[in-house]
Amino acid sequence: MSDSSNPIRQAEHKALPPTTHDEFARQEFVRSYKQYLVKNVHGANQLAYDKRVKPKIKREKQRDPKDRFEVRDEMVHDPHYQMFSALLRTSQEMMWSSCQIPVQRNLESMNKIINKTPKKPLGSLRLDPTLATPRYHTAVDIHCQPGGYHSEFADNDASAGMVYDRGVHLYAMGQMGPHNNDIGASIALWLTENHPKFKPLKILDLGCAVGNSTVPYVDTFPNAEVHAVDVAAPMLRYGHARAEDMGKTIHFTQQNAESMDFEDESFDLIVSHILLHETSDKAIRNIIKECGRLLKKGGMMVHAETPQYKGMDPFDAFMLDWDTRNNNEPFWARSHEIDLKQLSEQGGFDPNKEFESMIPSAFQITEAKRSLTFQGGDFGGGGFWFIYGNEK
Amino acid sequence: MAKLQRKAKGERPTFFQDSNVDKVIAMVMGLAGEVAVMHDRMGTMEHLLEKKAGIKRSEIEKYKPSPKVMAERAAWREQFLGEVLRIVEIEQEALATGDTQPYDSAVALVEWDG
């Protein structure tokens, strides 16, 4: 459960922008607001559906609703769903705003700190100003973060990273742990438990943002060389500074995961963390193909997502689909309906070595307390992550 | 000074027939957030004043709530949100208990056979 009696405080590091008393309080309010919606408002959507919406559909069609579209057509008129949605959307906007305020105030000084190269850097940062930001990334600002991951508002700007790192903590209501690293930590734990003999020596994280999910691989596989790519320079600048301050060796490069400059068969493990649904139907296929090219024989790719809609109750699928239209996630719906086995096969993988699994959250194993309530919508309360992958 | 973008690119969804209702909800919750900020600040002043009279603003800015205080504040906010969103809660309660009969049915009951 999003446990209000035990609020998790985000771990501090050099790149995290400082907050005044009131700036911190404003962010804490957003966390409580989101927890409140999960705990006290979200659940009644089911009630409204069972008592009002489903009976109406059954009356009119003389049968149960057959898919999430039929549920949607009626639910959007339900007063509780309308109120819930308006409140959730508002919480998302207030979250980004509350994270932006201290970043705006500290923009110059924090950019200076973040861009200062350490005397003896552990990892590296390679930016490519000529790299085109993909259209699926610029069509709308994903997750409603103003300016998205890519926009720059000052020279060598890292503000998107500063806003994002704090925003992720609030979005997950602290449930991704003090370092926002739960998704990476959960896959790393799953690998050590389910593939104890697999000791990757070269690891690549795709769409790494600020590298929050990348760090656990450095800890779990200390002998591995860890690389991370993203299209957004502000995220990478921040991620590099953050990793250096945390003492983690990561090599960040600004690249599009659809086409990278690494050599064929040069990685043992390729991972991504809720990346695929942010791309496009064309890009997702290119990315899987690229994984196939970069992996060594015996290597593995693992992608964390939220569960596919297939086999899901129409109402649950409708609720999980909230973010598609209401939180700037245009590829969310389609990406949850793609045949993953086929995707693997098209990417050159052996479909017999494809796997899909629900894996427990590493942070929640230690915390051992979390509800199974999804926030919208989106992740941030599941207690489990869905993984899709393929051995090569 | 460079200024961050405030609106996320993309059409903002609305959920009510009159999109101004969506905006009013955003305003009400924005205001609720600012009340919660003031409550935290008052709590911080109370904590500092328990130790000594006469405190500086910089001491308020430097104050870091302990895990215990953070939990107390989170509990306060939950109750506060329950009050702000009372109307949403009672409608859920009515839906759950089946308290959805029209008021006229009560009038009819007492006027005709109550």
Image (cartoon, rainbow, N blue to C red):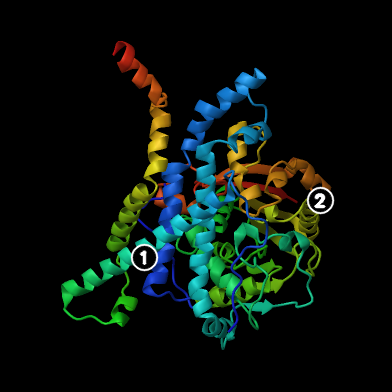
User: Residue A44: image x %, image y %?
Assistant: 47, 36
Q: Of the residues tagged 2 and 1, which is closer to the observer? A: 1
- The residue depicted at 57 percent of the width and 58 percent of the height is A184
Occupied quadrant, residue A301: bottom right
Residue that lies at the very extreme toward the top in this rendered image: B113
* Chain of the residue that carries numbered disc 2 in the rendered image: A
Q: Is residue A301 visible?
A: no
Q: Is residue B86 visible?
A: yes
- The residue depicted at 38 percent of the width and 71 percent of the height is A22
Which disc number belongs to residue B54?
none
The CA distance from mark 2 to mark 1 is 51 Å
User: Residue A20: image x %, image y %?
Assistant: 40, 75
- Secondary structure of residue under mark 1: helix
* Chain of the residue that carries numbered disc 1 in the rendered image: B
Mark 1 Cα within 10 Å, few/some/many (few <14, many 20+)? many
- The residue depicted at 27 percent of the width and 70 percent of the height is B44
Residue matched to label 2: A347
Residue matched to label 1: B37
Q: How many marks?
A: 2
Amino acid under disc 2: Gly
Identify whether A20 is placed above or below A345. Answer: below
- Secondary structure of residue under mark 2: loop
In the image, A239 versus A51, the foreground residue is A51
User: Residue A229: image x %, image y %?
Assistant: 69, 67
Q: Is residue A247 left or right of residue A128?
A: left
Q: Is residue A372 left or right of residue A307?
A: left
- The residue depicted at 32 percent of the width and 16 percent of the height is B111
In the image, A38 versus A258, the foreground residue is A38
